[in-house]
Image: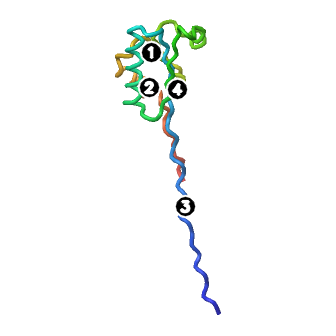
């Protein structure tokens, strides 16, 4: 009589971690004006320091694409527009007040999912 074979059971696969929140940002500028240059530098720094790896930042020059201002409801430049996660937010100016922007962005992060009691 043969010895019974041992059954090996693979450990359970942990559930996928919650996906990171991705911020969709567009910075609307006008050419190489000083305020536009400051806004580009400040937006890049803000994203790298406070949203590392979880943002998409597009720079839109309204001299090249003026119709985009109307599409995004931009009335002044420079303007940073956050479309994801909702709600849509607009920050007008050179973005030098990063602490205010970060505070608003932090408030817009979706709340973590609640675990159902078993």
Q: Residues within 10 Å of mark 3 (few under 14, many from 20)?
A: few
Q: Which residue is mark 3?
A: 12
- In the drawing, what numbered circle is on residue 24? 4
Please indicate whether residue 37 sits to the left or right of residue 3 in the image.
Answer: left
Tell us which disc is closer to us: 3 or 1: 1
Tell us which disc is closer to us: 2 or 4: 4
How far is the residue under mark 2 from the one under mark 4? 11 Å
- In the drawing, what numbered circle is on residue 56? none
How far is the residue under mark 2 from the one under mark 3? 36 Å
Q: Which residue is mark 2?
A: 105
Measured as percent of width and height from the top left, residue 103 is found at 39, 24
Image height of 106 relative to 117, above or below: above
The residue positioned farthest toward the right in the image shown: 1
Chain-order first, disc 3 or disc 1: 3
Image height of 53 relative to 98, above or below: below
How far is the residue under mark 3 from the one under mark 1? 46 Å
Q: How many marks?
A: 4
Q: Secondary structure at mark 4?
A: strand
Q: Secondary structure at mark 2?
A: helix
Chain-order first, disc 2 or disc 1: 1
């Amino acid at each position: 009589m043969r010895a019974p074979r041992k059954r090996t059971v693979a450990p359970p696969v942990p559930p996928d971690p919650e996906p990171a929140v991705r911020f969709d940002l567009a910075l609307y500028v006008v050419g190489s004006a000083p305020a536009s240059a400051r806004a580009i530098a400040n937006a890049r720094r803000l994203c790298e320091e406070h949203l590392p790896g979880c943002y998409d930042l597009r720079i839109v020059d309204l001299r090249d694409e003026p119709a985009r201002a109307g599409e995004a409801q931009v009335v002044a430049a420079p303007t940073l527009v956050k479309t994801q996660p909702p709600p849509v937010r607009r920050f007008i100016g050179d973005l030098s007040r990063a602490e205010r922007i970060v505070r608003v962005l932090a408030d817009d992060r979706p709340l973590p999912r609640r675990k159902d009691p078993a």
